[in-house]
Image: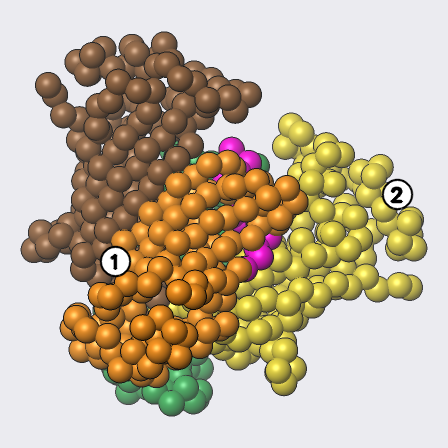
Chain colours: A green, B orange, C yellow, D brown
Amino acid sequence: MQELKASKEITVRFSEVDSMNIVWHGSYSLYFEDARTAFGEQYGLGYLDIFSQGYYVPLVDLSFNYKQPLLFGNKARVDIVFKNTETAKLIFHYEIHLVDDERLIATGKSTQVFLDRDYRLVWTHPPFYEEWKKKHHLI
Amino acid sequence: MQELKASKEITVRFSEVDSMNIVWHGSYSLYFEDARTAFGEQYGLGYLDIFSQGYYVPLVDLSFNYKQPLLFGNKARVDIVFKNTETAKLIFHYEIHLVDDERLIATGKSTQVFLDRDYRLVWTHPPFYEEWKKKHHLI
Amino acid sequence: MQELKASKEITVRFSEVDSMNIVWHGSYSLYFEDARTAFGEQYGLGYLDIFSQGYYVPLVDLSFNYKQPLLFGNKARVDIVFKNTETAKLIFHYEIHLVDDERLIATGKSTQVFLDRDYRLVWTHPPFYEEWKKKHHLI
Amino acid sequence: MQELKASKEITVRFSEVDSMNIVWHGSYSLYFEDARTAFGEQYGLGYLDIFSQGYYVPLVDLSFNYKQPLLFGNKARVDIVFKNTETAKLIFHYEIHLVDDERLIATGKSTQVFLDRDYRLVWTHPPFYEEWKKKHHLI
């Protein structure tokens, strides 16, 4: 089965660095979101695509494992992998590597669920998502 | 004429401190917004009050003068003063002082305009704002 | 054995709310950090206390479970519990509840390790931390 | 006389958009800082260059004029221009334009001063800055 992947290069901003001269851990939420955005653009599953179909996809789980610090000016690559599942969820795995030497900086996971316009949880694949999965040979 | 004022105490968060060990300048946008929220609550002119009347009040001007640095753990007080004007604008002046010794940390100004639900600029006082001004003896 | 706990009340800022009108998931990093700061102040284990002893305590793991959304203006209480462990780590569990009705908003965990001034991992309890644990009847 | 300019393209992140679906005004601090970083890289006047010479350059003034909103996914270009002055200050002017149609989104200014390692204000051009100016035909 096909594995859907995307990558996003980021450069550490001065404002993302804390008083220990390393990237504040909370900024990794931004990096993962940048990667989800890149994935969405590449495969036609962006926030606005989903929203236009009548759904929200809020995060329900998010986790980070910090291996090495990121410093101001560092260039890093966030790799995102779609984890196929039969439940009506979007599950992504992440790895952040330094561009220079491929050193592993952090890993992580996220899970999103589908809510309809009335913020009710959707238990089965929304039709547009079923289509999307078929198109990408995931079902 | 009456001058409308409010104050908001803030404590510097670790995440707001940059690699020079001082508060990143961009965080002052948060502090001023906290002060506007406190003002809105005290005088019944909060974002949600305004929104429920059918208006948005985006910022069109914002400026900061940084006098002294804020450090992690500092407690500061943001004073906000409503500057009455005949035009359909919300103008606020700000001063941030250390709670400990009243040292002046920063000053600033902001200007907001009224947009209607279709994001069109409103040139005259919206009725609810006219009422609000009368109630507070500003016209 | 004694369980060390602290709590921190937070009010959702306008800037923390995203385009779905709910708190952006990344802002929970701030809330957990606010809780760690409150814990540190209450029990004498703040960032600056630790730093003055010659150590950093960067996060190595951080996870969030989002149960219910937080909205602009919501007041919530972040409860933090110290999880005692024999390894040289700081482990905290978190729960965020709405102040109004005690509804559970989110849970989470974090793990921090000790680094010395040369950023080397410290495998055993630093002396000051050993003292701190004794003082609080954790060993 | 030569005018030193740089440009930085940015893409609006989901986390930078507020509940009115537009970029929160405070995020422009990030965009201007991105532009200063790009300028510093292009002309050898980055934060780290300055710091390695023994100086800090904190902001003392910062102002924004918001003309048009930025939306999620918009691509914009931040243009930054160095404003030469005889005083020991770094003054920059900024313009943000949409990449698509060159629409003007915002303008702004910033002023930075030089502090030495003891955080004392430096009233005359630091030697390295004098050199930098000569190299770029600014004096």
Residue linked to disc 2: C131
The span from disc 1 to disc 2 (Cα, nearest Å) is 54 Å
Amino acid carrying label 1: it is: Val
Residue B101 on image: x %, y %: 64, 42
Residue farthest toward the left in the current orientation of the protein:
D101
Say whether residue B16 is magenta: yes
Task: Find residue C79 and report its image quarter.
Answer: bottom right
Q: SS for tag 1? A: strand
Residue B60 is marked as 1
Q: SS for tag 2? A: helix
Q: Chain of mark 1?
A: B
Which corner quadrant holds the N terminus of chain B? bottom left
Amino acid carrying label 2: it is: Glu
| Residues rendered magenta in the picture | B8-22
Residue visible at 45% across and 58% down? B80
Frontmost residue, B52 versus C43: B52
Task: Find residue B48 and report its image quarter.
Answer: bottom left
Q: Taking C39 as reference, is A114 left or right?
A: left
